[in-house]
Amino acid sequence: MSAAPAERPAAGGPDTSGTATANILVRMTGSGTPEEHIQTEAGPRPAAAKGGVVVAVEAAGVSFAEVQMLQHLHPFPPRFPFVPGYDLVGRIVEVGPGVTGWKTGDRIAAMPRTGSWQRFVALPAKDLTEVPEELDADVAVALVANGVTAYQMLHRLTRLRPGQTVLVHGASGGVGALLTQLAVHHGLRVVATASAAKHDAVRQLGAEPLDYRAPDLAAQVRALVPGGVDAVFDHIGGRGLDVGWSMLSRSGTLVSFDSSVAGYRPGQWFRPHVPALRRTVVRFFARHLGLTGGRRMSMYYVKPGADFSADYAELCRLAAAGVLTPRIAGRHPLEHTARAVRALLDGTSIGKHVLTPGLTTAP
Ligand SMILES: NC(=O)c1ccc[n+]([C@@H]2O[C@H](COP(=O)([O-])OP(=O)(O)OC[C@H]3O[C@@H](n4cnc5c(N)ncnc54)[C@H](OP(=O)(O)O)[C@@H]3O)[C@@H](O)[C@H]2O)c1
């Protein structure tokens, strides 16, 4: 195996001057492996449309959504080829006609769901949210989709009180680690799952780790919390949702925020999400007929809007105060995107992988 080329800051870093005309973009060309289907290419810099801006990207997140898109397991799969990239942080370098409230040089975050893996991105101004200058770009981007998802599930969907207990699945991952930190900060006891090799990292977040592969997971949770937990945050889906439901206290809430890790095969697209939808509907009616004993189930999907911006601002405040410390697994130039996706696919790292157009490979 040849040694990985060194990475170094690109001359001038991310181009926030607004003068560069060349774009670099990453395309996902089909379903398969990252090595086959993730490619970097050059292109023209986009222009700002009416009501839009052009942003020079400081950092773009690599998220599980892109792994799902590559495997054709995402519930809203874009058509190949496309430029992936769920979220980004950057600086406005051009403002289109009709834009008010934003100017060149402003630092912003956005969650376009696709299109962030580029040096320059054109975005509608209405979808931007402000990023404080004091935050590192990689920390700021880790708080966008992952952070807002964690925050809203905890503070908007479940409204738990300090002293209650929750089960967080995947606490070694981007969403789960932030959710665990937020829950601990809120005064909750956190039981959390991760693979055994990552239990120390989960313990350091203040949680009690268990292995999600344990066949007697529900019994282990019951042994720790005999009355059941007040919320389960589940991205496993399938029959995992029944295990989660069985762990709840009498008034507990099961939050399903994905269904992709329950062993589905690439290409099954919407199928992983059917069990979650079916169970949510059945339990909704069962609850209203008084058949669930107070337990309820909700599905969660992050979306932009006023709540998103307010919650992102609060996450930035918590990060600046040292309450939230998103762990960064790796910073990669755009040319090494396939490696970042490979690391996520193989589950070999802890924390967020970030693409940094300001890095470039050594010649
Ligand atoms: N609903 C929404 O709006 C929304 C928004 C953002 C993300 N998500 C979803 O949230 C999930 C986590 O995203 P992420 O960015 O945090 O991904 P990530 O960083 O790759 O983390 C994945 C986590 O899942 C754990 N895991 C792997 N296999 C598992 C299994 N069979 N059972 C239980 N846990 C398992 C991993 O544990 P180990 O590494 O220890 O194996 C890791 O902690 C993804 O499914 C993503 O699609 C949903």
Image (cartoon, rainbow, N blue to C red):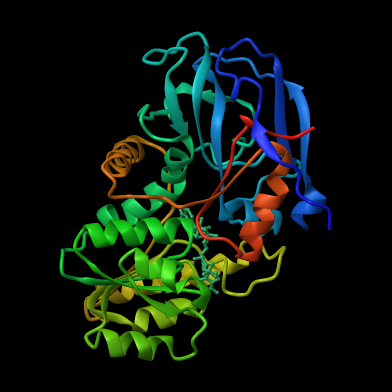
| Residue 360 image-quadrant placement | top right
Residue 158 seen from this side: no
Badge count: 0
Looking at the image, is 12 positioned above or below residue 315?
A: above
In the rendered image of this protein, does residue 86 appear above or below residue 210?
above
Q: Nearer the viewer, residue 332 or 87?
A: 332
Measured as percent of width and height from the top left, residue 138 is found at 48, 40
Where residue 201 sits in the image (x, y, percent)? 43, 66
Residue drawn 33% across the image and 50% down it: 324
Left or right of 182: which side holds 209? Answer: right
Corner quadrant of residue 228? bottom left
Q: Is residue 97 visible?
A: yes
- Which residue is pictured at 79% across the width and 49% down the height? 37
- Picture residue at 70% right of the left edge, 54% below the top: 70
Which quadrant would the N terminus be assigned to in this image? bottom right
* Residue at (75% x, 44% y) in the render: 80
Q: Quadrant of the C terminus?
A: top right
Q: Percent position (x, y) of residue 152?
A: 32, 51
Q: Is residue 111 left or right of residue 12?
A: left
Instruction: Tell me: 287 left or right of 73.
Output: left
Within the image, what quadrant is residue 348 found in?
Answer: bottom right
| Position above or below: 237 against 210 | above
Decide if residue 98 is on the left or right side of residue 204: right
